[in-house]
Amino acid sequence: MEYTIDAVANKMLVMIIIAAVIIAAAGAVFHREMGAALAFAFGVAMSAGVNAFKVFLLKKAVNTAVGMGTSRAATNHLRVQYFLRYLATAVVLVAAVFIPFVDFFGAVFGIFTLAIASYGLKFFIKDDQAMADVAFAPASMSAEDTIEEMKKIADEHEKTNG
């Protein structure tokens, strides 16, 4: 089966929603009051929504960077997008502190939905080893190395699929 960045992003979005529902349900079990359970669920939902937005930003950044090639502009674009994704996370956490009907710990647990979806994605793409290797490249990999690796995979894919 062939995986495109759009297909991978869509699977991640579904897994983010599933993880958020499971975390919110677990939070409801541990909270004794309905109001506290709802505040926890709002925190999880807010974070999961931002994580869905971050997946969209990541998809857009990868498509743009691959189109730019290995230029310095592509590297800078990836760095800016990386910063914007972290900024979105910070905004959610700060908002959770100041919005009274959102539980901060729900927002913190909701942030983990992206990591859960990323690790869960590995079960869906295990038959396409090259895609799995790029999707789960070490965090220490530089933007230039990531772009080079994506270009190699795109070239190999072109050669094999015509």
Image (spheres, helix red, strand yellow):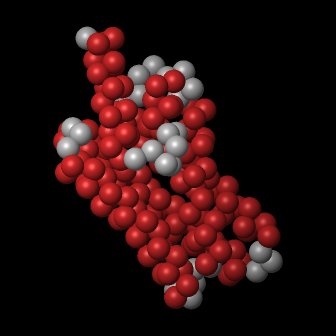
Q: Is residue 87 visible?
A: yes
Please determine whether, in this image, residue 4 is positioned above or below residue 51. above
Q: Which of these two is toward me, 19 or 161?
A: 161
Residue 114 x %, y %:
54, 54
User: How many labels sit on residues?
Assistant: 0
Q: Residue at x 61, y 70 (%)?
A: 108
Q: Which of these two is toward me, 136 or 71?
A: 71
Residue 38 x %, y %:
64, 75
Q: Which image quadrant: the N terminus?
A: top left
Instruction: Describe residue 138's horizontal placement relative to residue 38 as left or right.
Output: left
Q: Residue at x 57, y 35 (%)?
A: 122
Q: Residue at x 52, y 43 (%)?
A: 138
Instruction: Describe residue 74's horizontal placement relative to residue 9 as left or right.
Output: left
Q: Quadrant of residue 110?
A: bottom right
Q: Is residue 18 visible?
A: no
Instruction: Describe residue 51's horizontal placement relative to residue 157 as left or right.
Output: right
Q: Quadrant of residue 162?
A: top left
Q: Quadrant of residue 141?
A: top left
Residue 152 x %, y %:
33, 26
Q: Residue at x 32, y 57 (%)?
A: 79
Q: Which of these two is toward me, 87 or 9?
A: 87
Residue 5 x %, y %:
37, 37
